[in-house]
């Protein structure tokens, strides 16, 4: 019976050809130097799958209206079976995905993997990164708590500063004057329908290009030698086993974060009450801080420079060398850009905060400049 069923299926679907193609892909040779650093790409894929699975599960209970959004997420977090875990995996998974993507970009940058003929792989990668940040931005409104509401109010306000298009762009994002149920509906649709399709298409193209061109060798551009059994390892089992080691370790880290630092429900959004100290997520902090030092329009232009540089880097660094030692200027610019992003991110985090340094209270003003904190009100007598 089973044999006849298999024969029937084989007549209608080319099982043999499919299996052969799969085998070719599995045995595809990789350069011998491929290491643990080369697992960040597949780790990003793993985390992306986590976002899809947990996102679909969250949609079962989530209701995208101002009346129900906050309560529905509170229900998921407090009452639904394993709801806290699903929501935590989705929230923390988003943070880890950004971290892993930065590490993946750093590895491909340092190893000169963006150079000829992989310029398009890099450009598609940068577009994926921007799409992931779009996911983060649209997703952050969905809990409809105070932080979500006011961070989106500030974020969409920035769009209003774009010359000529600003007002139209802000209206397009918000669907009205302020952040309202129209905004929530738009962000929801973009988050659960539009961006998922965009990311699936882009990641598909990215992986197709990676497979087509193979992993970057160490030799300079133009001096690559074909891989031989002596200079290569097979994708399966050598590299896949590394990936299968990294996935559970990351899952463990992810679950630990969810258990130790579960995402909060917060306070329901109140459009009439602006809370103090609203700040964007850590990955938007460098942009948030940088925008403060410039008039609106100039700020918008300045923050676009790093994105443009990132996108165009394969066409700017055209030297043949791949190893960092062979292209010190390019690597120095990359490291300086990363250091500046961390520096402005830190300033953004500290701004408008009072911290205690060596027993003394220091207040960081909105520009991140430290000043001695004003003494607080005197304690009540006897208190
Ligand atoms: C969800 C997003 C992404 C996924 C799933 C992904 C996946 C992958 C995978 C599996 C590889 C092969 C091995 C490796 O890990 O290095 C790879 C290679 C590559 N990726 Fe990504 N990637 C993503 C985002 C990015 C981003 C943001 C960039 C850069 C801006 C980028 C640039 C590259 C380049 C240049 C290569 C070629 C590496 C080489 O030939 O050595 N990728 N990617």
Image (cartoon, rainbow, N blue to C red):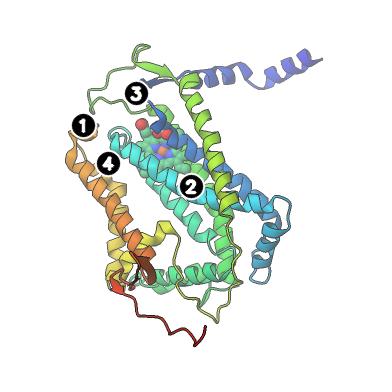
Is 200 drawn above or below residue 298 in the view shown? above
Choose the circle earlier in sequence order: 3 or 2.
3
Picture coordinates of residue 36 (x, y %)?
41, 30
Residue with the mark numbered 2:
96
Q: Position of residue 35 (x, y in %)?
A: 39, 27
- Number of other residues with Cα within 10 Å of mark 4, as a class: few under 14, some 14 to 19, many 20 or more: many
Q: In the rendering, at what x and y percent does residue 50 appear? A: 58, 43
Q: Nearer the viewer, residue 151 or 172?
A: 151
- Label at residue 314: 4
Q: Mark 1: few, some, or many residues within 10 Å (few <14, many ≥20)?
A: many
3D distance between C-alphas at marks 1 and 4: 12 Å
> For mark 1, what is the residue?
321
**104 to 80, vertically: above or below:** above
Q: Earlier in the sequence, mark 1 or mark 4?
A: 4
Residue 33 badge: 3
- Give the crowd class for mark 2: few <14, some 14-19, many >=20 residues within 10 Å: some
Q: Position of residue 218 (x, y in %)?
A: 28, 26
**Residue closest to the far front:** 382
Q: Tell me the SS state at disc 3.
A: loop
- Looking at marks 3 and 4 on the same chain, the residue that comes earlier in the sequence is marked by 3
For this rendering, which residue is in front, 366 or 171? 366
Q: Which mark is residue 206?
A: none
- Quadrant location of residue 111? top left
- Would you place residue 235 above or below residue 341 in this image? above
Q: Nearer the viewer, residue 284 or 215?
A: 284
- From this viewpoint, is residue 243 visible? yes
Q: Earlier in the sequence, mark 3 or mark 1?
A: 3
Left or right side of 248 for 309:
left
On screen, residue 162 versus residue 51, left or right, reads left
User: Secondary structure beneath disc 2?
Assistant: helix
């Amino acid at each position: 019976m089973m044999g006849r069923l298999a024969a029937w299926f084989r007549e209608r679907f080319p099982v043999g050809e499919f299996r052969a193609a799969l085998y070719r892909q599995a045995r595809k040779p990789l350069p011998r130097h491929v290491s643990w650093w080369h697992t960040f790409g597949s780790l990003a894929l793993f985390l992306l799958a986590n976002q899809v699975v947990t996102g679909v599960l969250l949609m079962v209970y989530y209701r995208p209206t101002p009346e129900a959004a906050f309560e529905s997420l509170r229900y998921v977090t407090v009452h639904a079976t394993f709801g806290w875990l699903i929501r935590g995996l989705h929230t923390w998974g988003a943070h880890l995905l950004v971290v892993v993507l930065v590490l993946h970009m750093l590895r491909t940058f340092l190893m000169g993997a963006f150079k000829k003929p992989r310029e398009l792989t890099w450009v598609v990668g940068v577009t994926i990164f921007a799409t992931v940040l779009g996911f983060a931005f649209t997703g952050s409104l969905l809990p409809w708590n105070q932080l979500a509401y006011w961070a989106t109010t500030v974020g969409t306000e920035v769009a209003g500063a774009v010359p000529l298009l600003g007002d139209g762009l802000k209206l397009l994002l918000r669907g009205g004057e302020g952040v309202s149920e129209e905004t929530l509906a738009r962000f929801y649709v973009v988050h659960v329908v539009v961006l998922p399709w965009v990311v699936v298409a882009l990641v598909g193209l990215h992986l197709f290009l990676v497979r087509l061109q193979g992993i970057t060798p160490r030799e300079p551009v133009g001096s690559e030698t074909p891989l031989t059994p002596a200079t290569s390892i097979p994708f399966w089992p050598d590299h896949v086993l590394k990936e299968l080691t990294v996935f559970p370790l990351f899952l463990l880290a992810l679950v630990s974060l969810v258990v130790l630092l579960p995402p909060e429900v917060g306070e329901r959004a109140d459009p009439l009450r602006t809370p103090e100290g609203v700040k964007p997520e850590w990955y938007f902090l460098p942009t948030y801080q940088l925008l403060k030092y410039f008039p609106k329009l100039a700020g918008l232009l300045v923050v676009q420079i790093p994105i443009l540089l990132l996108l165009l880097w394969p066409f700017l660094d055209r030297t043949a060398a791949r190893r960092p030692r062979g292209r010190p200027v390019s690597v120095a610019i990359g490291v300086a850009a990363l250091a500046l992003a961390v520096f402005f991110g830190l300033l953004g985090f500290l701004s408008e905060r009072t911290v205690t340094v060596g027993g003394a209270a220091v207040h960081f003003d909105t520009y991140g400049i430290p000043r001695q904190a004003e003494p607080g009100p005197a304690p009540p007598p006897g208190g």
